[in-house]
Image (cartoon, helix red, strand yellow):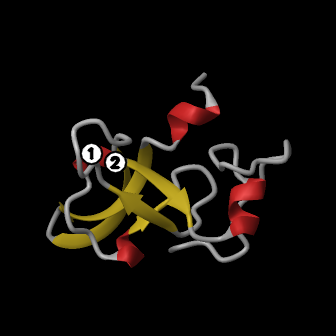
């Protein structure tokens, strides 16, 4: 099992797939370093499905690519949150 501090380096991105003859949207878990210019409604926390902000490394000695919850309440209830209070729960306003 990953440590909470390692979980902020992964998120879910909504991608389009071709299934038989239909195009369908599905959530795929990816490292934050693989998120390229995705719209905010197409990126969410992999654990609570809440809205997150993507931070990319800007300088060589800066923090590595990661995500942070936009909502403090999501962060308090998510196992990957900076303010996690011990009981994991889904976001009250999940990104679908």
Q: Which residue is mark 1?
A: 33
Residue at (26, 55) in percent of width and height: 35
* Residues under numbered marks 1 and 2 in contact, where contact means CB atoms less than 8 Å apart: yes
Residue in the image at 38% along x and 75% along y: 40
Task: Say if 40 sits above or below 82 in the image.
Answer: below
Residue 71 position within the rendered picture, expressed as x and y whole percent measured from the top left: 65, 71
Tally of numbered tags: 2
User: Going by the picture, which residue comes out furthest to the top?
Assistant: 1
At numbered mark 2, what does the secondary structure look like: helix, strand or loop?
A: helix
Q: Residue at x 22, y 38 (%)?
A: 60
Residue at 77% in and 55% down: 77
33 displayed left or right of 68: left
Mark 2 crowdedness (10 Å alpha carbons): few <14, some 14-19, many ≥20: many
44 sits left or right of 70 in the view: left
Out of 2 and 85, give the one closest to the viewer.
Answer: 85
Residue 15 percent across, percent down from the top left: 27, 63
Position of residue 72 relative to residue 57, above or below, is below
Q: Residue 2, percent across and down?
A: 57, 25
Q: Nearer the viewer, residue 47 or 19?
A: 47
Residue 57 horizontal side relative to residue 52, left or right: left
Secondary structure type for disc 1: helix
Return the residue at label 2. 32
């Amino acid at each position: 099992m990953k440590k909470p501090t390692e979980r902020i380096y992964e998120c879910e991105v909504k991608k389009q797939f071709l299934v038989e003859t239909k195009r369908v949207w599905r959530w795929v878990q990816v490292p934050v370093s693989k998120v390229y210019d995705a719209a905010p409604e197409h990126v969410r926390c992999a654990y609570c499905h809440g809205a997150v902000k993507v931070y990319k490394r800007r300088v060589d000695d800066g923090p590595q690519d990661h995500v942070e919850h936009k909502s403090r309440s999501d962060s308090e209830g998510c196992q990957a949150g900076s303010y996690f209070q011990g009981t994991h729960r889904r976001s009250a306003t999940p990104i679908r």
